[in-house]
Image (cartoon, helix red, strand yellow):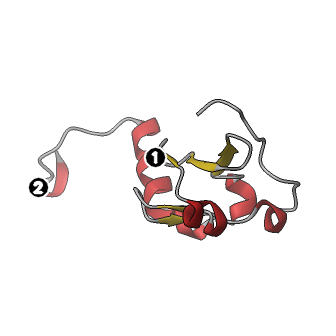
Amino acid sequence: MKNGHQHPRLSRRRRIERWIARNEWRLPASVLGPSYVLVDGGKAIKCLVCGRTSYNPNDVVNLYCGHCHTFHVPAGLLGENSPEQSTAA
């Protein structure tokens, strides 16, 4: 416990997870991959960040998650086709 730190030493994995959480915005979206999946034939969007599904048509059109307030990057900008569509919610 050097320099007045009051917490036990974090594991290497936890330190990496904390670094990613703090610096994720610096990583290009193409590295992270798609962060959403269109479900129910494109009538809903499932956010892979928080796991919630929205059936709001405006959220689907804008690729937006109202729960975690994330505007997702369209798959075409990632250099891919569209994210895999699923029929399960």
Q: Quadrant of residue 89?
A: top right
What SS does tag 1 mark?
A: loop
Give coordinates of residue 51: x percent, y percent.
49, 41
Q: Which residue is mark 1?
A: 50
**Where's residue 43, x and y in %?**
66, 50
Label 1 neighbour load within 10 Å: few <14, some 14-19, many 20+? some
The kind of residue on which mark 1 rests is Cys
Residue closer to the observer: 33 or 38? 38
| Left or right: residue 79 compared with residue 51 | right
**Residue 4: assigned label:** 2
Residue drawn 46% across the image and 37% down it:
13
The count of marks equals: 2
* Mark with earlier residue (1, 2): 2
In the foreground, 42 or 13 = 42
- Quadrant into which the N terminus falls: top left
Answer left or right for 66 relative to 6.
right
- Structural distance between the alpha carbons of marks 1 and 2: 35 Å
Disc 1 versus disc 2: nearer the observer: 1
The image position of residue 30, as x and y in percent, is 75, 60
User: In the figure, is residue 86 to the left or right of 9?
Assistant: right
Q: Amino acid at mark 2?
A: Gly
Q: Residues within 10 Å of mark 2 (few under 14, many from 20)?
A: few
**Residue for point 40% across, 56% down:** 67
Q: Residue at x 74, y 43 (%)?
A: 41
